[in-house]
Image (cartoon, coloured by chain):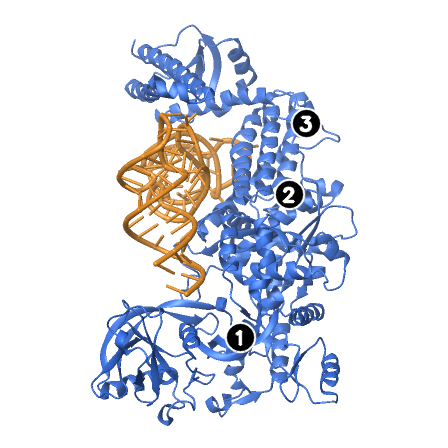
Chain colours: A blue, B orange
Amino acid sequence: MLDKTYDPKEIEARRYPEWEQAGAFRAHPESAKPPYCIVIPPPNVTGSLHMGHALDNTLQDVLIRWRRMKGDDVLWQPGTDHAGIATQMVVVRNLEQEGVGLAVEGAARNDANKKLLSREEFLAKVWEWKAFSGGTITGQLRRLGASCDWSRERFTMDEGLSRAVLKVFVDLYKAGLIYKDLRLVNWDPKMLTAISDLEVESREVRGSLWYFKYPIEGSTDEFIVVATTRPETMLGDTGIAVHPDDPKWKHLIGKHAVLPLVGRKIRIVADEYSDPEKGSGAVKITPAHDFNDFEVGRRHDLEAINIFDKFARVNENAPEKYRGLDRFDARKKIVAEMEELGLVEKIEPHTHAVPYGDRGGVPVEPYLTEQWYADAKKLAQEPIAAARDGRVKFVPERGRDEFFRWMENIQPWCVSRQLWWGHQIPAWYGPDKKVFVELTEEEAKAAALKHYGKEVALERDPDVLDTWFSSALWPFSTLGWPDKTPELAKYYPTNVLVTGWDILFFWVARMMMMGMHFVKEVPFRTVYLHGLVTDEKGQKMSKSKGNVIDPLELIDKYGADALRFTVMSLAASQAGRLRLAPARVEGSRNFATKLWNATRYAEMNGAALPKGFDPATAKLTVNKWMLGELARANTTIDTALAEFRLNDAATALYEFIWGVVCDWYVELTKPILQGDANSSEGGPEKDETRAVTAYVLRETVKLLHPVMPFITEELWDKLGHRAEHGALIGQPWPVAPALEPDADAEMGWLVKLISDIRSARAELNVPAAAKLRMLVVGGDGTTAKRLETHRAAIERLARIEGIEAASTAPKGALQIVVGEATYALPVTDVIDLKAEGARLQKEIKKLADEVAKIDAKLGNAAFVSRAPEEVVEEQRERRSQAEQTRERLSTALERLGS
RNA sequence: GGGCGCGUAGCUCAGCGGUAGAGCACUGUCUUGACAUGGCAGUGGCCACAGGUUCGAUCCCUGUCGCGCCCA
C-alpha cells in the first residue's frame, strides 16, 4: 500500500542512480533506430545550477525522454564549458583573498606585497579549482532528473575538444578567415583583456556634458566649443569635426585649434558624423579611444594617439603631470584645470549610455591593439542561407528575424583574449615577428625552418581564444570531429537546440558558422528559444538584488518533478521573460500528490491489469468514455510536444489527470468498485472497471513520464509493471486507441446533470448531508435508459436517493432542466421557495440574454448571407437549445408558485 | 535613434476571427472510506486606449500610452 503522501526526496535519491547505473540514458549509435540528438548548452564547469539551467534542461529532458519512449535512439550529449573569463575571474578572486596575485605586466605596481603566480602556477590553480568544484553542476543536473548520456560527458578543454579547437583555428587561418589586425577593441581595464562586442553591455549613466573651448590657432579671442562626455580623452585629441553645412562652424573648416593643456595643433575637419543639433555642434576627435572617432580619423587621416595603458591609466603619450593617473582621476584633474583656464563654457547634466564589460563590471575602454579576428561576415553567409531556406528552423519563428538582423550586420569577431585560462592560440613568432600558425610547435618550427632557411627561436602567442570559439564547435567537437566517428555520422545534424534568447548571437549564430564551414551541414534542424526566468515581479534575478530563487531549494521543498512541471508550464510565454511564482511550484507538487493518491485509491480498490487485457473489449459506457478521453489526451500531448508547445502539453496532462481521471472517472466508478452491484470478489462490471482503471493509470504514467520522471517511475514500479516490463524510462510511448463518440455524448449529459444538481443545491444551501428524491418529468426513452445505467453514480455524486419518473413536478421542488427533461428534487421543508424562484429567474434571464444575442446576429442579413453556413447553423442550433431550456425553466418557475 | 515583444480576473499567465480560460488568492460549504498538499459550489474581466478591416475583433491592420528586451 502506498503512503498517504508522496515523498519526493527519498524517491528521487533512489531512482536517478538506478537509471544511470542501468544505462538507461545511453545512446546506441550502433542501433538501427532513428537518431534523436540534443547537445546540452554546456554550463560553466565551476558553476552551479540556477533557474535558467533548470528551465533549459527541463525542456531538453522532456523532449529527450519523450523521443526515447517514441522509439528513437536518443543522445543527449552533456558537458561543461571552461568559461575562460568567468572562471579566471573566480579563481583570481579566491587567490586575492590569500594575498596572491598574477604575475602580469604592471601588476606589481598595484600590489607590491603580493605573491605573484606565473602562468603555469596559475593554471595549476585553476585546474585544482575545477577538480574541486567541477562536479557540482553535473550533480545538480542529475538532481533535476536530466537523462544525459553521462558516459559521453565532455569538457571544452579536454584533449579531444582542444584538438578540434586548434584544427579549426589553423584551418581558418590558412583559409584567410582568421587574421591579425590592429584596430580598436573593447578593452576591459579590470580583466586586462580584449572582449567581443557581445560581451559589452551598455548602461544608462547619469553624467555630464562638458563644453570646452579650444582656442583657434593664431587668435587670442576666438574659440571653437566642443561638447564631450569624456574630458580625459582630450589628451588624445587629434582633430575636431564639424558638420560641413553647419553655419556656426563652417568658417573654421580647414583651420587649426590648439589643444589646451597639451598644446598640440589639431585640425578642424568637415564630417557628417558631427550633428549640428547635438551639444555644440563640434566634436573633438580622439581616434584612439572612440569607435566613431576612429572612423572619422581614418577619413581625414588624423593621427591616433593612445593615451592609456592597459589599466586605463594615462600613459607616456600625455603630458608628464597626468601620467599614471587613473582615467577618472584624470578626468577630475583636467576639468579642474580647464575651469581654471576659463576654458569651460558650461556643464550640462547628461544621461548617456556607457559601455561596461559584462564580466569585469567596469566601463570598457576602446583601445587600439593588435588582436586576432575571425571574418564573421564571410562565415555568416552559409548560415544565413540555411536559415533562409529552412534547413534550420526557429521556434518561435521570430528568432529567425533576430538571427538575420545580427548576421547581416555582423562585425569582425575578436577571438583573442589576454587571459591565461583557455585554449592558447597556436601561433608562433619568429625573431622578426613573422607568424607561423600550426597545430603543433614542431610544425611551426618546421615552417619557420623552411621560411628562414635555418633554425630560429620561436615564441608562442600568449593569448587564449574566446570561450565562445570552442563553444561554437560544440555540436560536432563533442561527437568526435575531426575524426569521422560513427557518432558524428549518426547524430549530426542534431535535432534541436534548446537555449535562451540571450545567447542567440553569442552561441547559436557561431555554431551555425562553424558547423556550416567545417561539417557542411547545419548543426541542428530546429532552434527552440525560450525566455529568461525572472522573479514574480519580472526582475532579473541577481545576487545583489537578493531576489534569486534557487532551484535546488525548490527541489528540496517540492521535488524535482514539481519544479519541472512548473517551468514547463511557463515555457510558452512569447515575452522575453518568464516570471516564476513559487506558489506555482507548490501547485505542481499538489498535482503530483493528486496522482499519487489516485494510484493509492486504485490500489486499495483492487485495480489490476489482467494478462492480455484489451481495452477495446470494454462494455461499460463510463469505461469506454474514459478510454476515449485517454486517447484524446495522448494525441493532444503528443502533438503539443511535436510542435514545441510544451506548456500546452503540461496543461493537457494536468487537465486530464486532475480534471478527468480524478474528478470524474474515479468518482463515477466508485459505485461500481465499492458498491455491492457485484460481489466483492468481482463480477463482470467490477472486473472491467478494475482493469480499465489500472490500464488508464498505466498509460497515464507513461504520458506524464517525460515531465515528471521520478514519481511516474515510482508508480510504475508500485503498480507492478516494472517486474514484467522493466523500467518506465524505457517503455514505448502509448498508442492512442480509437475514440468512442457515443460514450462521449452520454457522459457529457451525465456530467452536466450532476453538475447542475450540485450547483442548484449549493445555491439553495441544501445541506450536503441531505439526500433528495429525484422526479424526472418529460424524459424520453434514451434518458430513461441513461438514468438507469448511471443511477448509482448520480445518487452518489449528486446526493440523491431514489430516481423515478413523474408526469408533473411536485410543488415546491428544486428543478433542473437538462436536455428534454426536467428534474425535480422535492425539498419543501428544507429550502426557501423564494430563493429557488430567484435562482430559476436568474437562469432564465441568462438564457433569454443569450437568445436575444443570437437573434440579433441572425436578424442581421449580412451575417446570414456572408458567414459560413456551418457558423450560421451553429447559431440556430444554440438558439433552439437555449430557447427550449428557457421554456422548460419558465414552466418550472410557474409550477414552483402554484 | 532603430528593431522586437508584452499590456486579458486581485496576482502569475494561457487563448489569438464566431460561447472569455487556468493556477494561486478570495467567499460559502464538506473530515463523503484515494487525496484538507483535498472535495463541491461560487465571486471576480469596457481582453490598455483610439481608429480601421470584417457579417462579426480580445484575436488582423494603423496610431497613442505604459512596461520590458535587443541593437546603435
Position of the C terminus of chain A, as image quadrant, is top left
Residue A118 vs A696, above or below: the answer is below
Residue A427 appears at what percent x and percent y? Answer: 65, 79
Residue A66 horizontal/vertical position (percent): 64, 45
Residue sitting at the far top: A807
Which residue is identified by label 1? A90
Report the residue at 67% width, 39% height from top: A733
Q: Which residue is mark 3?
A: A615
Q: Secondary structure at mark 2?
A: helix
Q: Are marks 2 and 1 in contact (CB under 8 Å)?
A: no
Camera-nearest label, 3 or 1: 1
Q: Label 2 is placed on what type of residue?
A: Leu
The amino acid type, in three-letter code, at marker 1 is Val
Subunit under mark 3: A
Q: Residue at x 74, y 44 (%)?
A: A726
**Mark closest to the chain's N terminus, 2 or 1:** 1
Number of callouts: 3
Residue A496 visible to the viewer? yes
Q: Residue at x 62, y 21 (%)?
A: A620
Task: Tell me which corner region of the image, top left, top right, bottom left or bottom right, holds residue A605.
Answer: top right
The structure residue drawn at horizontal position 56% and vertical position 16%, both measured from the top left corner, is: A789
Q: Is residue A714 left or right of residue A310?
A: right
Q: Amino acid at mark 3?
A: Pro
Quadrant location of the N terminus of chain A? top right
Chain identity of mark 2: A
Q: Which mark is residue A15?
A: none
Q: Are marks 3 and 2 in contact (CB under 8 Å)?
A: no
Tag 2 residue: A715
Q: Nearer the viewer, residue A565 or A854?
A: A854
